Image (spheres, helix red, strand yellow):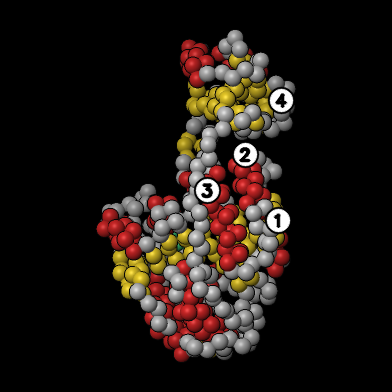
Amino acid sequence: MQTVTVAKGDGIGPEIMDATLSIIMAAGARIKVEEIEVGEKVYLAGNTSGIAKESWDIIRKNKIFLKAPITTPQGGGYKSLNVTTRKFLGLYANVRPCMSLHPFVKTKHPVMDIVIIRENEEDLYAGIEHQQTDEVVQCLKLISRPGCEKIIRYAFEYARQYGRKKVTCFTKDNIMKQTDGLFHRVFDEIAAEYPNIQHEHWIIDIGAAKMADTPEAFDVIVMPNLYGDVLSDVAAQITGSVGLAGSANIGETCSMFEAIHGSAPRRAGQNTANPSGLLQGAIMMLNHIGQTDVAEKVQNAWLKTIEDGVHTNDIFKEGTSKKLVGTKEFAEEVIKNLGQEPSELKKVRYEKGMSLNLPKYVRKSPSKKELVGVDVFVQWNGNNPDELATLMQKTDLEEIKLSMITNRGIKVWPEGFDETFCTDHWRCRFKTINGHPISKKDIIELLKKAEENQIDTIKTENLYHFDGIQAFSMGQGQ
Ligand code: NAD
C-alpha cells in the first residue's frame, strides 16, 4: 500500500481529481490518500508561496504527489507553486506523452505518438532577473552539466524502457553556443552509450515547425525547460485537446503527477471538464510506483471509452462522438469498462518495473581554469561608440586592454556600423595583450580606474579558458 499526497487544487481541479480517484480506486489501486490544501485559498490567506509548511512535510514524507491544477492569482508577487515544487523537490524530468486518438478524437495528425521530455529545473526558469540600466533588463539563462546529463540520460532510459526507437534533441545552439551548445554536446555524448536507439538533433525553430506539421516523424523529444514548456502544450493541443495529456515530474526521491492543463476557472463547478489529463498523470504515477497491472487496466478502459465515442464537451464532435457526457459520467463509463480493452486503438501492455533507476550525478574533477580577461558592462547614455572607447581606454592596464565593445551582443567598436541601433547598455571587453592569464586583482584595479573616471559599471563577467578552450562567446560580427 502506497500513501499518496493528493491536492485537489482550484477551478476544475476538485471535479477532475474526484473523477480520477474514483476510476483508479475502482481499478484496485493499492494506495492510501493523504490530502493537503494548496493553491488559491492558501495564497489569498496571505501565504505567497501557495502552500503551508506542514504540507511540504507531508509531500516529502510520502514522496508521491498527485496534484490537480491550481490557480496562481495574477499580480501581488505570488510565485508559481508548480515551478517551486519542481525545483524544491529536484523533479528534474518532466515527461509529457502526447498521442492522437484517431479516428475517435478529431485531429489533423492521425498518427502522432510522441513523448516530450522537458528539463524542469533550470534554463530561463531559474527566474534570475535584474534591471541593469534605464533601458535594459536581463534574465539569466543557466544550463548546467548535471542538469543536461540527468535529463538526457532520463530520455534515453525512458526510450529503452518503453520500447521507443528514437530520441530527438531540440536546441538553438547555432545562436547560443555555450548554453544550448552544452545541452547538444551532452546529448551526443550520452547518445553514444545507447547504440540501439536512434538519435538526432534539430535546431528548435525548424524542429518545432516540423513537429507541428509532421509529428509522426518524432518519437521521444528531449529539450531545455522553456522550449519544452511551449512545445509540450503545442504537442498536446494538436492531438485534439489540452484536456487529454498528463505529465509526470520525476526526481531522485520524490515525484509529482498532474494534467498538463491549468485550472480552467471558467469551467469550474459545471461538470464539463475532461478528467483525462489528470487520469493520464495518475496512470503514469501507478506505473512509477510499480502498480503496472492497475495502470494497464485503467488505460485500456479509458481507451475503450474514448473509442466508444463517450466524450466530454472539449472533444465532442457530431459524427465521430456518440454520447456527450459530463466529468462524473465520463468517470462512470471508464469504471464500467474496467477489464475491457479497445478494439481499434492500440491496447497497452505495461511491463513490471516501469520506473527508471538512474545513476546519481557524480561531480567530475575540476578543469584547469584560466582567467584571460573581463567583460565590463556599463550604462552610458551617449551614442558614439568611439567616444565610449576613448573613455574606457582610460581604465586600460599595462597588460590588459580594451579589445571590443558590443551593444546587445553586436560589435560596435572597433569598426562598427553607423546603422546599428544602440541602447544605454554596453559590454566592454578587456583582454590580455600577450595571452597570459590575469588575476582577480587586475580586475579590481581596472574597476577602481573605471570608478575614478566616473564610469557607471553595472556588472562584470570573467572570461575563462577551461582546459585551454575558450569558454565565452565572441561578439556578433567579430
Ligand atoms: P487552462 O489550461 O486552465 O485553460 C486553457 C483552455 O483549455 C480553456 O479554454 C479551458 O477551458 C480549456 N481546458 C483546460 N483544461 C480542460 C479540461 N480538462 N477539459 C476541458 N477543457 C479544458 O489555462 P489558462 O486559462 O491559461 O490558466 C488558468 C489558470 O490555471 C491560471 O491561473 C494558471 O496559472 C493556472 N495553470 C495551472 C497549471 C498547473 O497547476 N499545473 C498549469 C497551467 C496553468
Residue 376 vertical position relative to residue 243 in the rendered view, above or below: above
User: Which residue in the structure is indicated by mark 4?
Assistant: 416
Does dot 2 land on a helix, a strand or a loop?
Answer: loop
Residue 459 vertical position relative to residue 1 in the rendered view, above or below: above
Callouts 3 and 1 close, C-beta under 8 Å: no
- Label annotation for residue 200: 1
Does dot 3 land on a helix, a strand or a loop?
Answer: helix
Mark 2 or mark 1, whichever is nearer to me: 1
The amino acid sitting under disc 3 is Gly
The amino acid sitting under disc 1 is Glu
Q: Residue at x 59, y 82 (%)?
A: 347
> Mark 1 or mark 4: which comes first in sequence?
1
Camera sees residue 296? yes
**Relative image position of residue 417 (x, y in whole percent):** 73, 27
User: Which residue in the structure is indicated by mark 2?
Assistant: 178
Callouts 2 and 3 close, C-beta under 8 Å: no
Callouts 2 and 4 close, C-beta under 8 Å: no
